[in-house]
Image: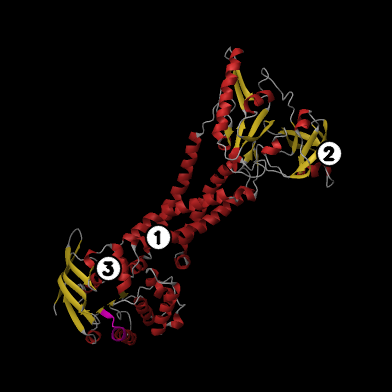
Amino acid sequence: MKKQIKQILYDMRTQPLIAWVTVIGTALSIFLIMTVVMIESVGVMSFSPESNRERMLYGMYVHINKPNGSGGSGSMSYKCAERLYANLKGVEAISFQSDGAERLDIHGTTDETFTASVRSCDQGFWEVFDHKLLEGRLFSKEEVEAGSKLAVVSRSTARRLFGPENAIGRHFMLDHNDTEVIGVVEDSSPLAEWAYGEVFRPIDVISSNEWGGGYFGNIAAAILVEDGTDLESVRDQVKNRYAEFASELKAEGRDIIYHGAPFTQQVYADGIPGSNNTPDNSADRAINVAVLVILLLVPAINLSSMLHSRLRRRINDLGVRRAFGCTRGRIVRDIIGENFIVTLAGGLIGLGAGVLFALFYDGVFTVGGESVHPSLSMLLNFRIIFSAFAACFILNIISAAIPAWQAARMNPVNAINAK
Amino acid sequence: MNIIELRGISKVYRTKEIETTALENVNISIEKGEFVSIMGPSGCGKSTLLNIMGLLDKPESGEIRLLGTDCSTLGDNALSRFRNEHIGFVFQSFHLIPSLDVESNIEMPLDYRAGISASERTKRVADVLERLDISHRRRHKPGQLSGGQCQRVAIARALVGRPSIILADEPTGNLDSRMGAEVMELLHTLNREDGITIVMVTHNEEQARQTDRIIRFFDGRIVS
């Protein structure tokens, strides 16, 4: 390792152009790959308050046709959501909540009126998502059922509403309703699309803006499956409920169409193509894989020719090593190992550049069309660092394997006498 | 006891247009502890013979027996191991690794040998550095050394693995006469004190005369 680093430093001094182009080329490649990986990862990896995404299932829409051929699809009513998702086996917690956060004006004791993201949810929300409670308490089942005018607010919202004073027990105007603050939670990222909010209020379980014969409304279900339970077993239960529901609806001359709900975090992150379509993102995934392969292959071919040039200048050295007993396998290992150090150095620069790009450049991450910046802890997690490491490793193998093999195959006499 | 035995060695270099016979039915026996010179005009096959003797190149036909082992039948890894354990090379152009300092250059053959501890390596390198009087240059890079010092380092590298045979291809060819004489003295000392068998290709008649035996080559054949 020490000798390999010495060789790299020597190359950087004696062949600076090739060495730096190699490092910068690797950095650029890893930067592009990591940008793609980070965008992908942030959609599926767990971070607070969505700390258990790998155990999450999401029920979002229903699609019901009428006998005359017309039909509708959209978010569920509370009644419909309960019918499909309540009391499933193997579920740790379930949250019935509004199908997204609404943007509503709020006004507290400061003179400022401002727009906040308001999420309506039931008490299960606090079990499914792990918002960090800073002060006060969270609302209960009874308070949800009673339609109480109270709210839990995020820390920065509490400060904007009431200044530095304690927010608990204070009142503010929310959607023209006098609302009491009962709890303050830590701010969360809008990238936590199911858990994010600045104000959380009990959902109106009575009406939930019902329409379409009471089947449609504005409710979605977020389901936290028990640890160790197969997600498919829960999905199968829902599928069966759809089948039972379909039989009941047949009596009314209606038909419910199953589109694969509830969806895993991966399916949700890949995109749900509306309420009346079954998600099928295999084409998108194939394109993503193709993009990653191209992002690896194109620089790998260039890096391979760079390495070839570097090795051509060291052919005498390789011949001498062979003379003193270095095996072909060892030559290959040493060259790949040495190249891996260079690739890793470039990879670290690329990863750093990718993280900075994701943190500060507008438009890398968007929610509802608005640019959102992730936190550093969301980007520097095991999955992303491992992906960067794996990308470096693959890039190294692709770029170094052929030149290393060619160098190892050279006749030692020809190598020693090469000019 | 013969430490090197070549029987019926032939080597032909082929291109699309031409075939060149470099060695033709060469038979050589060298005893343990001998210091042998190989002489002849340029292109007569001296270096080819040395490369075949050092298991760096394969003959067209014939048998190579070193230290009683038939090396003609060994695979590439076994040949590498054999070279590492039994043969040291000294080249006319030194062929030191420019990125490594003197110490690391000398240590290189031990990198490829299994079963040598780090402390043993350090000790062996320190021993040869001291013996060849280059300890004060241990941290220098080859580019910072004179030709004579480079050749001393190269000899140290050949010596560190404690080989039975040293093959030297014009070891004084790139040195002035004073440094050349120093290098020759060093090789004679190794031959005399350590009993290392040395085979040296040279154009220098005077240096050849100082060795135990001279093998003269012409057109790929031994002439005397």
Residue B67 occupies quadrant: bottom left
Residue B124 figure quarter: bottom left
Disc 3 is placed on an element classified as: loop
Residue A402 highlighted magenta (yes or no): no
**Tag of residue A357:** none
Pointer 3 and pointer 2 on the same chain: no
Q: Tell me the element at label 1.
A: helix
Q: Relative to B83, does residue A271 appear above or below in the rendering? A: above
Q: Can see residue A175?
A: yes
Question: What residue would you read off at disc 3?
Answer: B56
Q: Which disc, if any, is residue A108?
A: 2
CA separation in Å, label 3 and label 1? 21 Å
Q: Can the viewer see residue A418 in this picture?
A: no
Q: CA distance from mark 3 to mark 2?
A: 87 Å
At 47% from the left edge and 47% from the top edge, which residue is drawn? Answer: A295
Mark 2, Cα crowd under 10 Å, few <14 / some 14-19 / many 20+, is: many
**Residue B76 spot, x, y in % from top left:** 29, 63
Q: Percent from the top left, x then y, of residue B13? A: 20, 64
What is the chain letter for disc 3? B
Decide: few, some or many residues near mark 1? Use Cα within 10 Å; few <14, some 14-19, many ≥20: some
Q: Chain of mark 2?
A: A
Above or below, comparing residue B100 to residue A132 in the picture: below
Element at label 2: loop
Q: Nearer the viewer, residue A361 or B80?
A: B80
- Label 1 belongs to which residue? A333
Magenta residue span: B191-198
Question: In the rendered structure, which amino acid carries the disc numbered 1?
Answer: Arg
Neighbourhood count class around disc 3 (C-alpha, 10 Å): few under 14, some 14–19, many 20 upward: many
- What distance separates the C-alpha of mark 1 from that of mark 2? 67 Å
